[in-house]
Amino acid sequence: MTTFENFKREIARTPATGWRRVARWMRHQMPTGLYARSLLIIIIPMVILQSVVAGVFMERHWQLVTQRLSTAVTRDIAAIIDMIDTFPPNSDADIARIARERLDLNISIDKGTELPPPRPKPFFNILDHILSEEISDQIHRPFWIDTVGDSNLVEIRILLNDEILRVYARRSQTYASNTHIFLVWMVGTSLVLLAISILFLRGQIRPILALAKAAESFGKGQKMPEDFAPRGADEVRRAGLAFMLMRERIERQIEQRTAMLTGVSHDLRTILTRFKLQLALAGNSPEHDALSKDVEDMQTMLEGYLAFARGEAEEDVGRLNLGELFDKLGMEAELLERDFSCEIHGDDTVLVRPNAFTRLVANIVSNALRYAGKVHVESRNRAKWLTITVDDNGPGVPEAFRDDVFKPFFRLDEARNLDASGTGLGLAIARDIARSHGGNVTLADSPMGGLRAVIRIPA
């Protein structure tokens, strides 16, 4: 491909890239909330419509009316000039009376041949521009006008042969001065309609926010707000009813699973008790010790499985002090002769299900203490998220197995001795508890050379 073809392709690609950048910038600038976006959907079209209407009105109506009024006043002045030229001398008083009574203009004729110096013209004064054009087109004489200021009168001076005609007209005769009434009515009506729209929109958004809050509480394992009930539009009501039915089905499934496992655990514990009694009556022997060990392993596995399946859903949310929790973990590390350190950034009191969260952190830290000689725990409590990072210098977990280790009963080694590898439920229970709080547990490489476990839940 030639250089020229590459240049053409680059030029063709540039507009698309520019539009994508503009669209990306607009997405970052736009509000993310439904309420704010709905307000923009209402306000932006209203502002655009008002701008177009006001522009058309100013361009057509205001300018047209002003031009017609200025044309009429200029014609009256031209008629007065014709009377001055036609009437005999010494008729100035009669001409002034006719102008005042018939044309509603106050005039005076002064001796002199010089007009005042031109005044600076205002940039946005439409009257000055239109009135000057009309006088130039109809009268064709030197003139001077004064339209600046807040006075209700407009002064016009026209140079005759050896006299100056001074004309005083009301501003309303030459200028559409009531235009602001239209703008006031348009803006005022829009503000009233906008206030009504905001009140109505708040009433429609409130049920959606209540549904989101209830779903968030349920996702964190907290109790749903007591005053929650489906409200609002039909679609929002259907979504609220569907959420309540889903929550009831999930809770009923959890209750059925817990009841079933409770019954299974009772039956299995009865059998294990019989095994222990028979082994106690059988006396001491090598086979006796092996069977006793198998019974203890079975009981450990059973308790671990029941703890995993039962979870901590029935526990209420409360406050947990992370400093006290880390102190207990430090004592465990001392018993195991491990090097343990911790840091707490932010508030050390968190709102969680205390027993479940304690078990979550304890499972992660105990797992690190089992395989590593040095463990460091760091807590960061921010505005939205609580993050607890556990680093160790142990052998770590291969990246290919970092998702598998959270599966129940999965162990990296093939050992059947539970003391050597555990039941394979510790990390599964930890992730289950984290997700019941609305968060998660992830694994990564640690700067200490071992494994890093990150617990992240909503604060």
Image (cartoon, rainbow, N blue to C red):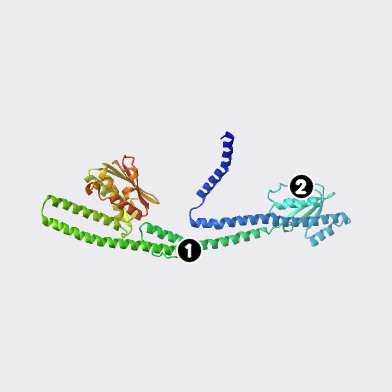
Residue drawn 78% across the image and 52% down it: 135
Of 267 and 63, which appears nearest the observer?
267
Query: Disc 2 on helix, strand or loop?
Result: loop
Of 63 and 421, which appears nearest the observer?
421
The quarter of the picture where the N terminus appears is: top right
| Distance between mark 1 and mark 2 Cα atoms | 74 Å
Tag shown at residue 10? none
How packed is label 2: few (under 14 Cα within 10 Å), some, or many (20 or more)?
few
Give the residue at mark 2.
116
Q: Residue furthest toward the left?
A: 283
Disc 1 residue type (three-letter) = Glu
Which of the two discs, 1 and 2, labels the residue nearer the N terminus? Answer: 2
Note whether residue 444 is visible.
Answer: no
The x, y position of residue 392, in whole percent, is 30, 42
The x, y position of residue 189, in whole percent, is 60, 62
How packed is label 1: few (under 14 Cα within 10 Å), some, or many (20 or more)?
few
The x, y position of residue 148, in whole percent, is 70, 51
Answer left or right for 179 relative to 236.
Answer: right
Answer left or right for 224 relative to 57.
Answer: left
Q: Of tags 1 and 2, which is closer to the observer?
A: 1
Disc 2 residue type (three-letter) = Pro
Residue drawn 44% across the image and 65% down it: 230
The x, y position of residue 140, in whole percent, is 81, 49
Give the residue at mark 1.
235
Label pair 1/2, CB-CB below 8 angstroms: no
Q: Is residue 101 above or below residue 10?
A: below
